[in-house]
Amino acid sequence: MFENRNQAGAALANALAEYAEGIPVTYALLRGGAPVAAEVAKRLNAPLDLILVRKIGAPGQSELAIGAVVDGAAPTIILHEDIIRDIGVSGDFIEKAKEVALAEIEERRKIFFRDHKQISPAGKTTIIVDDGLATGATMEAAVKAMRKAGAKRIVVAIPVAPSEAIARFRSIVDDVICLETPTPFWSVGNHYHAFPQLTNADVIRIQDEFEGRGIERPSSNSARRSV
């Protein structure tokens, strides 16, 4: 059990210490990955940025991921074809869900990237962090997007996940750091004493901690972020 996301992030940072010399970029999956990634970035003295990903939930079972969409010039989409086939999800449902996900991503872009562009992963070691994995759909989409954007090396870092998810990611990324693989695995939140729902304001506060740390961020304009 982890006390909270910050404590989990500190423990994860210790496990990632070997990557400090390579000056990686740490990317958080929203929203729960932000405080975890912040602890990692602090320990590695690395820049922190976000990946805008939206899960596509199954009809009537929004928590069951049948895929995910990642922001980008050409959005990256991952679909779990086996789940889609097993529960009989229609093509029309998936297309409408994609449109909704992209609209939500655009809204989040306005909030979180108002005064800067995402740090490019091209040619860099990228560490993608979340507070845990269940199906792994959002993380898989993020990995595919980072690979397409030219990341030199991709590391997936999470405090907790089912062992079968970790085995899958080991085949598609350069390294996986996971602190706990409990059996049975019920949900990510079950492995935290405190697991509150985070708000946009929480994420913005975490971003603001990294401003003025001497790490260059690509600027798009000089306006301050607001919620």
Image (spheres, rainbow, N blue to C red):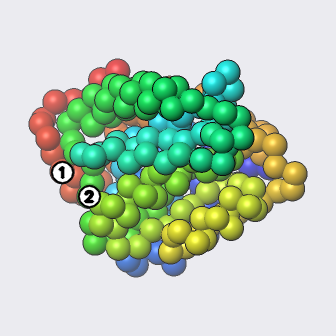
Image point 61% across, 32% down: which residue?
89
Q: CA distance from mark 1 to mark 2?
A: 9 Å
Q: Nearer the viewer, residue 76 or 50?
A: 76
Front label number (1 vs 2): 2
Image point 52% across, 54% down: which residue?
140
Asked whether residue 141 appears in the rendered view, the answer is yes
- Residue 170 in percent (x, y) is at 60, 71
Left or right: residue 147 versus residue 5 is: left
Q: What is the quadrant of the C terminus in the image? A: top left
In the picture as drawn, the residue positioned furthest to the right comes out as 184
Image point 53% across, 68% down: which residue?
172
Q: Nearer the viewer, residue 149 or 81?
A: 81
Instruction: Residue type at mark 1: give it.
Output: Pro
Disc 1: which residue? 218
Instruction: Residue type at mark 2: give it.
Output: Ser
Disc 2: which residue? 120
Sequence-first disc among 1 and 2: 2
| Residues under numbered marks 1 and 2 in contact, where contact means CB atoms less than 8 Å apart | yes
Left or right: residue 179 versus residue 157 is: right
Left or right: residue 147 versus residue 74 is: right
- Residue 115 in percent (x, y) is at 20, 36
Asked whether residue 101 appears in the rendered view, the answer is no
Left or right: residue 158 versus residue 172 is: right
Q: Nearer the viewer, residue 39 or 115?
A: 115
Q: Relative to 188, is 16 above or below?
A: below
Q: Quadrant of residue 187?
A: top right
Q: Nearer the viewer, residue 135 or 35?
A: 135
Q: Relative to 203, is 40 above or below?
A: below
- Dot 2, crowdedness within 10 Å: few (<14), some or many (≥20)? some
- Residue 186 in percent (x, y) is at 81, 43
- Residue 33 in percent (x, y) is at 53, 45
Image point 22% across, 52% down: which residue?
217
